[in-house]
């Protein structure tokens, strides 16, 4: 495994902190880590051993109520909150040049950039509902930081391909748990995504597909591909993970999206191939030759 290059090893920062602005404000600067601080943390995935190991994390936010740092990693599957002690230990691990068991990392220059402090939340330092609002990242901020592939990580399965979508789902659940506890996975396939949502994150999951899998990883229910057998506003979130291109024509896509809007109380999340150039078309056809990408 190639050794990740040192990134600002003297400071532990992935990028220069905002000039003249201590972050988080209202916390003594000598005990606070700035946005962009890099560290390692160990993750044990409850479903897949090959996803367990060390992940490179990036501090992106701060929760004033719990005094924990919100940190992101490349796949979007293991976004977590860390105490100051955990971050300190992770920085020491990062500086130790450890090479074994690293699942995902990035090299200098890989990241697209960090969102500016003054553009992601209140800059006044007000406190709302026990959470510090100044400099809190928005869900879309992740997409402006992490490109699809990095030097030390690239999507290699259904969960990783849908990682950015799952990051948004996890972020919504953290901040509005009362509106984000039940999920309907339409086009669930073997049920891998449904199993992960249920067992790793504790969602109440309904998995639907037009055929039953031979080797099911979760209980998948049959439906006709047009009408979802659930009541109006009966689930919080509906997910389409690389599903809509299987519809043979636009009318079926529209029917499914209307059904999703009918049964969802809060959100409909869609992860889909969007090929634009020939090299993208080749990769898309390679993973699904029957798909309709229009």
Image: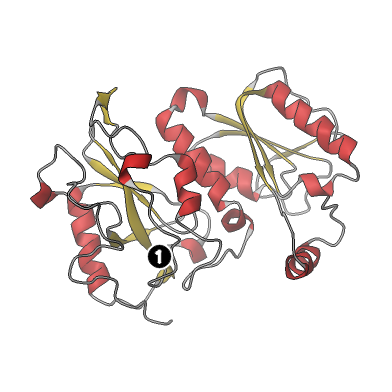
Question: Furthest-bottom residue in view?
Answer: 2
Q: Is residue 1 left or right of residue 15?
A: right
Front residue of 230 and 113: 113
- Look at mark 1 in the image and give the residue it sits on: 53
Q: What is the quadrant of the N terminus in the image?
A: bottom left
Rendered residue at 82%/33% (across/down): 254
CA neighbours of label 1 inside 10 A, class few (<14), some (14 to 19), many (20+): some
Does 84 sit above or below residue 289? above
Front residue of 205 and 250: 250
Quarter of the view holding residue 127: top left
Q: Is residue 257 left or right of residue 145?
A: right
Rendered residue at 72%/18% (across/down): 231
Residue 192 image position (x, y, % from top left): 64, 50
Q: Is residue 192 left or right of residue 26?
A: right
Does 283 sit above or below residue 46? below
Residue 245 image position (x, y, % from top left): 80, 49
Rendered residue at 21%/46% (across/down): 23
Residue 122 image position (x, y, % from top left): 31, 32
Coloured how? secondary structure
- Secondary structure of the residue carrying tag 1 is strand
Rendered residue at 46%/33% (across/down): 173
Q: Is residue 31 left or right of residue 290?
A: left
Residue 34 image position (x, y, % from top left): 23, 52
Q: How many marks?
A: 1
Question: Furthest-top residue in view?
Answer: 232
């Amino acid at each position: 495994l190639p050794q990740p290059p040192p990134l600002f090893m003297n400071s532990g920062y992935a990028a220069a902190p905002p000039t003249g602005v201590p972050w988080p404000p209202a916390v003594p600067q000598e005990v606070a880590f700035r946005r962009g601080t890099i560290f390692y943390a160990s993750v044990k995935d409850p479903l897949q051993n090959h996803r367990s190991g060390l992940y490179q994390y990036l501090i992106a936010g701060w929760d004033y109520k719990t005094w924990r740092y919100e940190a992101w990693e490349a796949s979007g599957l293991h976004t977590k909150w860390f105490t100051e002690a955990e971050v300190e230990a992770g920085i020491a691990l990062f500086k130790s040049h450890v090479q074994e068991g690293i699942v995902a990392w990035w090299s200098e220059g890989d990241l697209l950039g960090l969102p500016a402090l003054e553009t992601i939340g209140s800059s006044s330092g007000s406190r709302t509902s026990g959470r510090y609002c100044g400099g809190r990242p928005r869900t879309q901020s992740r997409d402006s930081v992490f490109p699809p592939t990095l030097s030390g990580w690239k999507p290699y399965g259904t969960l990783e391909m849908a990682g950015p979508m799952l990051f948004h789902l996890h972020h919504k659940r953290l901040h509005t748990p009362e509106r984000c506890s039940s999920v309907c996975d339409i086009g669930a396939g073997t049920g891998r995504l449904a199993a992960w949502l249920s067992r790793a994150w504790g969602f109440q999951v309904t998995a639907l597909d037009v055929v039953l899998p031979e080797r099911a990883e979760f209980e998948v229910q049959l439906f006709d591909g047009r009408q979802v057998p659930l009541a109006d506003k009966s689930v919080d979130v509906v997910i389409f993970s690389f599903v809509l291109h299987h519809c043979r024509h636009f009318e079926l896509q529209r029917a499914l999206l209307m059904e999703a809007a009918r049964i969802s109380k809060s959100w409909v999340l869609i992860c889909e191939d969007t090929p634009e150039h020939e090299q993208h078309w080749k990769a898309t056809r390679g993973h699904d030759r029957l798909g309709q990408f229009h």
